[in-house]
Image: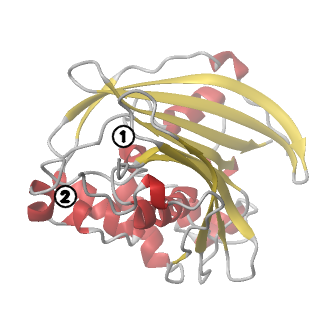
């Protein structure tokens, strides 16, 4: 039997994913993410630039939040299982914000042919005030105990 | 002051570009997110895994950029300053793991441009799709990106 961090049979049909709480957003993390991702938009680095652009100060890359959301999924189901992940950026993430990622199972599909069975998830991330900053969905394929 | 976007670039294909994934880049990217999974960071764990090497996190293909096909080029085509844009939506469809040392071909195009007026005023939505293939011409991942322009 193949190893899986989470087997398809063990996903409860109306299940909740364990939340992932990330460390408070610091400017240095935005600088590191800029370097790692290649997104050097000054709006995430330069407070004066961000204010002049009418954004009220620097804010985090949306893709950093999406990285958190993806991590919340892989922490639960294991690496290499995400087939599709999509998000909408609903609100800006500011310095000092604490982001918590959540997920809920919306569908389970039995194996089709040689493919592994799949699970659909609704995903969202909130800041410390409980405001949704990201909403999204994922499909993961999970090994079966078979 | 209100601005306009050049909608003529809808359908434009950008020149294909090639990326070779560096091992250190995968690790740098995972660490920047604060995701310290050994399957991204530990070569020995990766070698002994089902993939035979470390793999990239689900959003790693966002690092696949080229001067002739990146956001800066798209903004030039749209006639929009970088200070006006926000990231609206993002999607990754994954078919094969992204692996260190592999070389991938990236083809990017603008698939749609539409305008909407929301709570924060008039906005243009620019939809971009990038297809990433390996040397066997197998699709590794599809990347969809929606940029929002504050008009």
- What is the crowding at mark 1: few (fewer than 14 residues within 10 Å), some, or many (at least 20)? many
Residue hosting label 1: B64
Q: Residue at x 52, y 60 (%)?
A: A11
Q: Where is residue B41 in the image (x, y as percent from the top left)?
A: 21, 65
Circles 1, 2 touching at the beta carbon (< 8 Å): no
* Relative to B116, residue A88 above or below: below
| Dot 1: element | loop
Instruction: Check the residue under mark 1 and report the chain it is in.
Output: B
* Relative to B92, residue B56 above or below: below
| Quarter residue B42 falls in | bottom left
CA gap, disc 1 and disc 2: 15 Å
Asked whether A39 or A101 is in front, the reply is A101
| Dot 2: element | helix
- What is the crowding at mark 2: few (fewer than 14 residues within 10 Å), some, or many (at least 20)? few
Q: Position of residue B61 (x, y in %)?
A: 38, 43
**Label 1 and label 2 in one chain:** yes
Q: Of the numbered discs in the image, which one, if any, rests on residue B132?
A: none
Q: Which residue is drawn at 86% across and 36% down?
A: B116
| Quarter residue B78 falls in | top right
Relative to B34, B75 lies left or right: right
Instruction: Check the residue under mark 2 and report the chain it is in.
Output: B
Residue hosting label 2: B24
Q: Which residue is drawn at 36% across and 40% down?
A: B64
Relative to A34, B115 lies left or right: right
Relative to A34, A121 lies left or right: right
Q: Residue at x 40, y 50 (%)?
A: B58
Number of numbered tags placed on the structure image: 2
Q: Where is residue B101 in the image (x, y as percent from the top left)?
A: 14, 42
* Relative to A76, residue B54 above or below: above
């Amino acid at each position: 039997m193949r190893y899986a961090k989470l087997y398809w049979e063990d996903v409860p049909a109306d299940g909740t994913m364990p939340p992932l709480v990330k460390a408070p957003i610091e400017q240095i993390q935005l600088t590191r993410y800029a370097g790692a991702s290649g997104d050097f938009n000054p709006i995430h680095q330069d407070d004066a630039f961000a204010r002049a652009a009418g954004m009220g100060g620097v804010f985090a890359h949306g893709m950093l939040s999406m990285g958190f959301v993806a991590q919340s999924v892989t922490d639960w189901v294991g690496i290499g299982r995400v087939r599709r992940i999509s998000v909408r950026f609903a609100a800006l993430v500011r310095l000092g914000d604490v982001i918590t990622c959540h997920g809920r199972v919306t569908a389970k599909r039995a194996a089709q042919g040689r493919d592994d069975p799949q699970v659909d998830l609704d995903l969202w991330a909130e800041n410390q005030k409980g405001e949704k900053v990201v909403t999204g969905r994922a499909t993961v394929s999970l090994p079966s105990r078979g | 002051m209100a601005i306009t976007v050049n909608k003529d670039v809808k359908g434009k294909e950008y020149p294909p570009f090639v990326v070779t994934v560096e091992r250190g880049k995968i690790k740098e990217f995972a660490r920047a997110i604060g995701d310290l999974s050994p399957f991204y960071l530990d070569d020995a764990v990766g070698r002994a895994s089902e993939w035979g090497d470390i793999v990239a996190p689900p959003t790693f293909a966002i690092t696949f950029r080229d001067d002739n096909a990146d956001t800066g080029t798209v903004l030039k085509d749209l006639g929009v300053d970088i200070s006006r844009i926000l990231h609206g939506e993002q999607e990754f469809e994954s078919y094969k793991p992204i692996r260190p040392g592999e070389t991938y071909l990236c083809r990017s195009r603008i698939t749609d441009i539409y305008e909407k007026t929301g709570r924060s005023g008039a906005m243009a939505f620019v939809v971009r799709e990038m297809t990433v293939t390996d040397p066997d011409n197998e699709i590794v991942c599809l990347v969809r990106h929606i940029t929002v322009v504050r008009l």
